[in-house]
Image (spheres, rainbow, N blue to C red):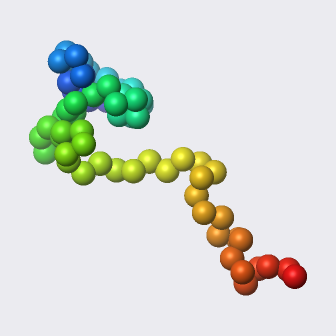
Amino acid sequence: MTVHVVLNNGKERKVTKDQLQYLLTTQKVWYFKRSDGWAVVGLDKMRTRKIPGIEEERRSHEVFALE
């Protein structure tokens, strides 16, 4: 599946979802097409992508502390 995007240089492209994620992360895209219309990067709500290993460690709660 491909997504229509408008890059910072004004060119339109069709990219994969992985390529879109890269373009969003590197801030190289202005707009991308959703099923309900165009999304404006920095203006419209975006999903946040969690980075593995950065999440809070749930097992470090004080209940589990061995002192």
Q: Is residue 64 visible?
A: yes
Please tell me which residue is depicted at 85% across the width and 80% down the height of the picture.
Answer: 66
Residue 55: quarter of image: bottom right
Residue at the extreme left: 37
Residue 62: quarter of image: bottom right
Residue 18: quarter of image: top left
Q: Position of residue 39 (x, y in %)?
A: 18, 40
* Residue closest to the eye, 56 or 4: 56
Q: Position of residue 5 (x, y in %)?
A: 23, 26
Q: Quadrant of the C terminus?
A: bottom right
Q: Quadrant of the N terminus?
A: top left
Please tell me which residue is depicted at 27% across the width and 28% down the height of the picture.
Answer: 29
Please tell me which residue is depicted at 65% across the width and 69% down the height of the picture.
Answer: 58
Q: Position of residue 19 (x, y in %)?
A: 39, 26
10 relative position to 3: left or right: left
Q: Is residue 66 above or below residue 2?
A: below
51 relative position to 57: left or right: left
Q: Total label count? A: 0
Q: Position of residue 2 (x, y in %)?
A: 29, 27
Q: Is residue 35 visible?
A: no
Q: Is residue 10 above or below residue 5?
A: above
Residue at the extreme right: 67
* Residue closest to the eye, 66 or 39: 66
Q: Is residue 10 above or below residue 55?
A: above
* Residue closest to the eye, 43 or 20: 43
